[in-house]
Amino acid sequence: MAQIDDYTAAYSWDLMAGVLQACVDDGAKFSTTADWSTQIMRSADTTLAAEGSLTRLTDMQSALKHTSSAAINNAFFTEFAGLMSSIYKWYINGTGTGQGAFASMSTMFADRHYRVPFNLTDAWLRAQGASLSSTYLSCVEEVILCVATMAGAPTYVYSNVLDTDMDFAPLVVEAVGDIGAGDLDLAYTATYSDDTTGAETEVISNTMSGGDQVLIASNDVTGDGITSGNDTVPMGATAGMVAGQHVLIQDRTWPVAMTADCDGAASFTAEDTLPFIPGDVVYLHDDDTANEEATIENINHESKTITLTAACAGTFTTAQNAFMRLKTADGYGWTEILAIGTVNANTSLVLDDDLNHTYSDQAFVQRVIKSIASVALTNGTNGDAINITAIPDRPGYATLNA
């Protein structure tokens, strides 16, 4: 068995976190803290769950490809603990080809550049006898940090802070209801990943409806994007980006670099094929060839070969950093957390390590933030209200399962 790939690993981590959170949400008899994770792993007994939990557990068990009833032989928890054991084997102590490449989970996370939901830390400790560092832990679900309302004089309610098990998070602004006739101006003080502080501003458009979200402190990747194994991210506007601070880079179109040229052909090999299925409409792209639309006919995941329904018209070469991506963004995508090494003003960011994945001009780079203070609203319309919310690095299992 080869070492687990990032696509499978990230989804497995997020699935486990979603399972635990659903147990908390359904299990009224237990605390909503991370201690619930420890309780589950210690007991391995589904009868501890509140009565309404068993249907949810069975559903999630099916998502784990396990067909036994959750109420029989503790099948659900056996599968759950087994998934953790498999991840540990893949990364740390496996002896198969590609296994056991890392000395510890911390070195693995530092190399792969992704984080996992913080509610897994107690369960991992119980199952594997080691802790997960807060550096590599992210939000389980959305956490509202501040509710700000224009009501005559603006009011501000600081409702939560980030859990102490994690260091920082990406943030969004969410409209509580429709924003009125004029744009709403938001100002606040942010504490960044390097513990420095700075003044931030956002314009909340009057086109936003209730529930709409906009990313805070986010800049778009531009140009031809960046293929895996490189550290320089093209960015036409670098305002706010500071060397030494951590950023989240994300692309929900699942770009994958080609590992063989596709010169008027109908098939090619790529660095990864798992995010795709036959029938997907994709774009082929390289540095000197514009996006060409194509449809996937077949995928051989073992050889990582993509076969299209027809030969492409253009020439896409590895020498010109050819890649394929989904035409329409998915609900999920590649994510990596790294620190900025150098900022080349309005040209690019040089990160402190090479990226493990490929990112297109549909990607964005978002500064992660530890805390906010001194929130202030101006302009807008009386009655406008927003939430400033910390979000998971990737959409959570509950979101995907919905």
Image: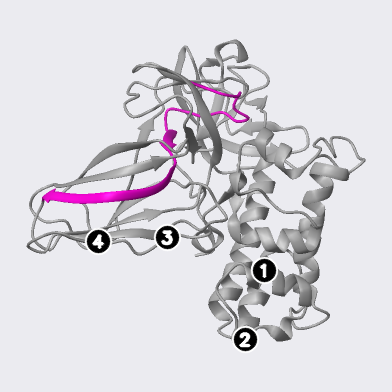
- Mark 1 lies on residue: 37
The residue segment tinted magenta is 350-379
Mark toward the start of the polypeptide (3 vs 4) = 3
Tag 2's secondary structure?
loop
Of badges 3 and 2, the one in the foreground is 3
- Mark 4 lies on residue: 210
Report how far apart the C-alphas of labels 2 and 1 lie in the structure.
15 Å
Residue 288 colored in magenta in the image: no
Q: Residues within 10 Å of mark 3 (few under 14, many from 20)?
A: many
Mark toward the start of the polypeptide (2 vs 1) = 1
Residue type beneath disc 1: Ser
Residue 28, compared with residue 224, is above or below; it is: below
Q: Are marks 1 and 4 in contact (CB under 8 Å)?
A: no
Viewport quadrant of the N terminus? top right
Tag 3's secondary structure?
strand
Mark toward the start of the polypeptide (1 vs 4) = 1
How far from the left and from the top, in percent, is residue 361? Answer: 42, 28
Report how far apart the C-alphas of labels 3 and 4 lie in the structure.
17 Å
Q: Residue at x 34, y 20 (%)?
A: 236
Q: Determine the image quadrant of residue 5.
A: top right
Q: Residue placed farthest to the bottom in the image?
A: 51
- Mark 3 lies on residue: 143
Q: Residues within 10 Å of mark 4 (few under 14, many from 20)?
A: few
Report how far apart the C-alphas of labels 3 and 2 lie in the structure.
25 Å
How far from the left and from the top, in percent, is residue 347? Answer: 38, 16
- Mark 2 lies on residue: 50
Mark toward the start of the polypeptide (1 vs 3) = 1
How far from the left and from the top, in percent, is residue 50? Answer: 62, 86
Report how far apart the C-alphas of labels 2 and 4 lie in the structure.
34 Å
Q: Residue at x 47, y 11 (%)?
A: 288
Of badges 1 and 4, the one in the foreground is 1
Residue 254, compared with residue 29, is above or below; it is: above
